[in-house]
Image (cartoon, rainbow, N blue to C red):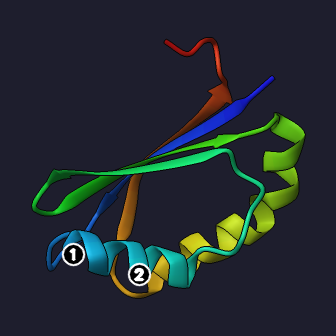
Amino acid sequence: MKYCTSTKWHHPVGVPDEAGFVEFIQGVLPDADVEHVFLWRIDDHHHGSLTVYPDKETYLKFRADLEQARDNITGVGITMIDSNEGPLLGQI
């Protein structure tokens, strides 16, 4: 069963433009076995992220690397303010 994580982040100096943002995320996140990653601007200082993994086991194998990447992001002043995870119930 597919497994999802959703996070919300605060950027004190503002969310970068699309090109800068994708480059930044690729630079701090390790490679992972994911099916989809969706990133969106919530407002000038917040972005959201939804990641879909093939299954919970894949997510759990990747979790230590993900936590390190999140620590690296926090180290540059960007703060995670919400996080949720669970099995995908459906897709429309």
> Residues at badges 2 and 1 in contact (C-beta under 8 Å)?
yes
Instruction: Tell me which residue sits at (18%, 75%) in the image.
Output: 12
Q: Please tell me how crowded label 2 is: few (under 14), some (14-19), or many (20+) other residues with Cα within 10 Å.
A: few
Position of 14 relative to 55 (above/below): below
Q: Is residue 22 above or below residue 36?
A: below
Q: Is residue 28 left or right of residue 81?
A: right
**Callout 1, which amino acid?**
Pro
- Give coordinates of residue 18: x percent, y percent: 25, 69
Provide the residue designation for mark 2: 24
Q: Position of residue 86 (x, y in %)?
A: 66, 28
- Kind of element beneath mark 2: helix
Residue labelled with disc 1: 16
Q: Which residue is farthest left?
A: 44
Residue 81 located left or right of residue 13: right
Q: Secondary structure at mark 1?
A: loop
Mark 1 closeness class: few <14, some 14–19, many ≥20 residues within 10 Å: some
Q: Quadrant of the N terminus?
A: top right
Asked where in the image residue 30 lies, by quadrant, the reply is bottom right
Report, in whole angstroms, how far the alpha carbon at label 2 lies from the one at label 1.
9 Å
Residue 15 vs residue 75, the one in the foreground: 15
Say left or right for 47 vs 39: left
The amino acid beneath tag 2 is Phe
